Image (cartoon, grey):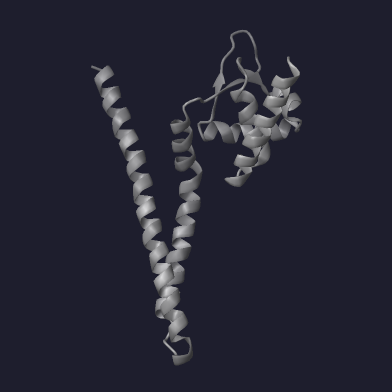
Amino acid sequence: MDDQLVEAKRHFVEGISRISNFWGFPKAMGALFAVIYLSPTPSTLDEMVVEVGVSKGAVSTNIRSLERLGMVHKKLVVGDRKDYYLAETDFWKIVKGILREREKNEFDKALQSVGESLELVEATPAHEESQQTQAFYKERMTALKQFFDSLDNVVATLLAIDDIKNSVLKGLFNR
């Protein structure tokens, strides 16, 4: 392969690894997705070990996570016992998979924490010396909780619309 293409691929893999890490996923997971995404043919775990430079166990663990998020799919190759993987190329599906599988749980925990903090502030007896701080905390926490509630509703609506669209399409084709 041309040296510039090798460099472009290396740079791409590094970039996706950084994005992965930024969103709280392991760098290796991002690197694996990038390698599979740029592969014109399905990739095996052994090929990924060589490409990414991590252990087979790490590749296996991260591939399972990528599968669960809908970012890669297993491809059956008749006559071969190895597992092959292809990258999902519909980025909206990837975003929905991440929202469904990962972010919802973490988001719910964060929202619960903000709500509990607000309850603590509201339950705190108002003392003259801390009244201003208490009012400030209440104002800020209420604003953030309202924003999180709205965001949660938007995400739930987007996912519900997609589910409705899919069920309508399935209904049309099952006639």
Count of marks overlaid on the render:
0
Q: Residue furthest left?
A: 175
On-image quarter of the C terminus = top left
Q: Residue furthest top?
A: 79
Quarter where residue 65 is shown: top right
Horizontal and vertical percent position of residue 33? 61, 30
On-image quarter of the N terminus = top right
Residue 29 visible, this orientation: no
The residue positioned 72% from the left and 33% from the top of the image is: 57
Left or right: residue 104 versus residue 146 is: right
Front-most of residues 32 and 65: 32
- Look at the picture and state if 36 lies above or below 1: below
Front-most of residues 81 and 58: 58
Front-most of residues 65 and 147: 147
Quarter where residue 40 is shown: top right
Quarter where residue 137 is shown: bottom left
Horizontal and vertical percent position of residue 8? 68, 25
- Look at the picture and state if 60 lies above or below 19: above
The residue positioned 35% from the left and 40% from the top of the image is: 158
Front-most of residues 83 and 70: 70
Horizontal and vertical percent position of residue 127? 44, 90
- Look at the picture and state if 58 lies above or below 85: below
Left or right: residue 8 versus residue 140 is: right
The residue positioned 53% from the left and 34% from the top of the image is: 68
Q: Residue furthest bottom?
A: 128
- Look at the picture and state if 113 lies above or below 3: below
Residue 45 visible, this orientation: yes
